[in-house]
Amino acid sequence: MGKGRVTVIDIAKAAGVSKSTVSLVLQASPLVNESTRTKVNAVMRELGYVYNRGAANLRQANARSKIIGIVVNDLTNSFFAELAVGVDTVVQSAGFVQFLSNTSESIDRQREVIASMREHGVSGLIISPARGTEATDLKPLVVAGIPVVLVVRNIPGAKVSSLVSDNHAGTFAAVEHLAALGHSRIAFVGGFPDTAVFDERLSGYRDAMSKTGTGFQDELVVSSAPSRAGGVGALARAMAMPEPPTAAVCFNDAVAFGVCDGLRARRIEPGKDFAVVGFDDVIEAKTTVPALTTISVDPQGIGQRAAQMLLKQINAGKPEAESVVSSVRLIVRESCGAAMNKLGRKMA
Amino acid sequence: MGKGRVTVIDIAKAAGVSKSTVSLVLQASPLVNESTRTKVNAVMRELGYVYNRGAANLRQANARSKIIGIVVNDLTNSFFAELAVGVDTVVQSAGFVQFLSNTSESIDRQREVIASMREHGVSGLIISPARGTEATDLKPLVVAGIPVVLVVRNIPGAKVSSLVSDNHAGTFAAVEHLAALGHSRIAFVGGFPDTAVFDERLSGYRDAMSKTGTGFQDELVVSSAPSRAGGVGALARAMAMPEPPTAAVCFNDAVAFGVCDGLRARRIEPGKDFAVVGFDDVIEAKTTVPALTTISVDPQGIGQRAAQMLLKQINAGKPEAESVVSSVRLIVRESCGAAMNKLGRKMA
């Protein structure tokens, strides 16, 4: 691409689509199908394209920089750092600066940071809400007409836009894959039970367990904090069962890394003696050993798309809530043992 | 502690120091020695204490929330996420909200976000500068009298406060430890050569290599991006040498994780067949397998301390630059093979 500025035409060419399709993606239009959108976003990222719409008129001399606020519930989870980077790639050349605040799952802190962002004239907010956030907590924003896009966790009854992953489909696919590899004692490991995301991921797991004939067993659900340390603890409890599982569908990648740590500390090799599947596809999933089989939700892509949804509302002048469920896909790497299985068969 | 609010008295009792010592720590007073400060900060963190000084008068009705800006150069490195969490614990109940922006090592973006934070009336800034930032880039802030604390990377000639780790002492200790374990082909792996931090860490490595009699060899310095992927690549180059190293002092923990990944991909067991030492002591260092031997700089503690330095300046009404070099220590875990060595001796 040389050193010149990457244009919509470059993106269109590289993605093999028309220029207007790229424009539609930039406006988060529902006219573009999911796979095209994913492809265009990936190309944008690869070429380092920065969204420029409205940059000229927003950057008038002496005009205050406009800010987009992003409020996340756990900054120490790299998923949210990646999501924020995705938001940044889209908002930055639209004349916006991104200010991020972390709530560490505290609703009180969330109220404070949102109030502060409002006082500072934020143009719109992307929020991954703290545990226990209710629709009434967001009402002041709705009343004030401030565009909001909820990400990751939806809140029933909140009259704002949301962008969540198809959690049910993700864990369903994970169980089906493990069952096809011959596993029947498959645990669901990690996550706090009082969140919508947990419920959705658990229901995908439950439905698939019932469908595969193994049947759903309550005892195979081992919840924990959705962190690496949580995964270590949950795995310990799972392995203490009279009949321990041989595979785990994990609440997220952080938990899955903890499960792998816990297995290795017991001299059990993940991907060989025990199958592990994560959820999120964070950057380390690819480079860790064994590489993590996981459900890809593309955190940077979600950040980009949420930013596009928010900019669309800001540009339209009035917030119109839309709910988007973003599709997910199973990425088979090493931690589930599939590659080894295949190799085994070839060698036999 | 029950459910009540944690007070300075609780902290003093738990840390075994006087109430006024705790107050001095909160004000970042130079009268408190390093080990006391570290202990008090650790207790604050453990008990969930939130700094409350001036909260009452800053939280007057209708007063705008005050913001502290934090500008980091790479949000995808969990070191910076942890540092931001540390800043948060100190600033939040002082009536401040933390707004974070990421520059992804872009000086242009850094200029934009700092300008935006200034426009929004930031009370002070904590900055981990992008590569190539010069003293002149910070001059407008100095002229405007905005308190600034540089963290991680110092900038020669900048008339602002700085809080950096004793990088030289860290890598020096790492080499000494590895030499004591019998290693002589010790590589210095990862990091961009054009940064002050790289120079300081490399000089500690160089001085220790010369002192241990092994001598410094240029070819054993393998630089790379300071990331996990960078570590994977650098390790590949190191292992391709005619006489490959048997140990690596890594630029940071992210690189060290990549080195471990690269070793395992070659069926070389880190901590057994090859010794690895990191730098930073991020959260995963403790839980990963093998647990990472590393130089602890306590990212959350650095965040807390930087916030205290900044609040002190803000409260004083005029910025007075101070330079603090924060001590580091070697944390011996498993990746260096020391535990195994000891075990070996015992068993022999």
Image (cartoon, coloured by chain):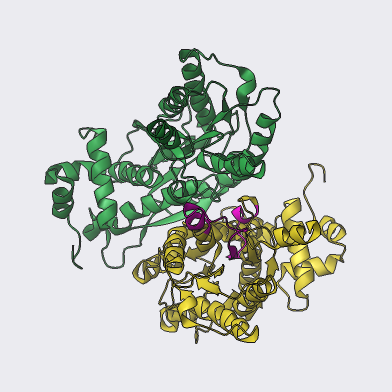
Chain colours: A green, B yellow
* Residue B160 appears left or right of B95: left
Task: In the rendered view, tell whether residue A320 sits above or below residue B344.
Answer: above
Rendering coords of residue B316 (x, y %) = 65, 76
Residue located at (50% from left, 82% from top):
B217
Seen from the viewer's position, the closer of residues A311 and A283 is A283
Rendering coords of residue A14 (x, y %) = 17, 50
Residue located at (41% from left, 83% from top):
B136
The question of residue B270 being in magenta is answered with yes
* Residue B229 appears left or right of A234: left
Q: Is residue A122 visible in the rendered structure shown here?
A: yes
Quadrant into which the N terminus of chain A falls:
bottom left
Q: Is residue B53 visible in the rendered structure shown here?
A: no
Task: In the rendered view, tell whether residue A198 sits above or below residue B239.
Answer: above
Residue located at (44% from left, 32% from top):
A341
Q: Quadrant of residue A241?
A: top right
The question of residue B291 being in magenta is answered with no
Rendering coords of residue B134 (x, y %) = 42, 81
Residue located at (20% from left, 63% from top):
A5
Q: Quadrant of residue B322?
A: bottom right
Q: Which residues are magenta?
A: B260-286
Rendering coords of residue A69 (x, y %) = 43, 51
Seen from the viewer's position, the closer of residues B15 and A161 is B15
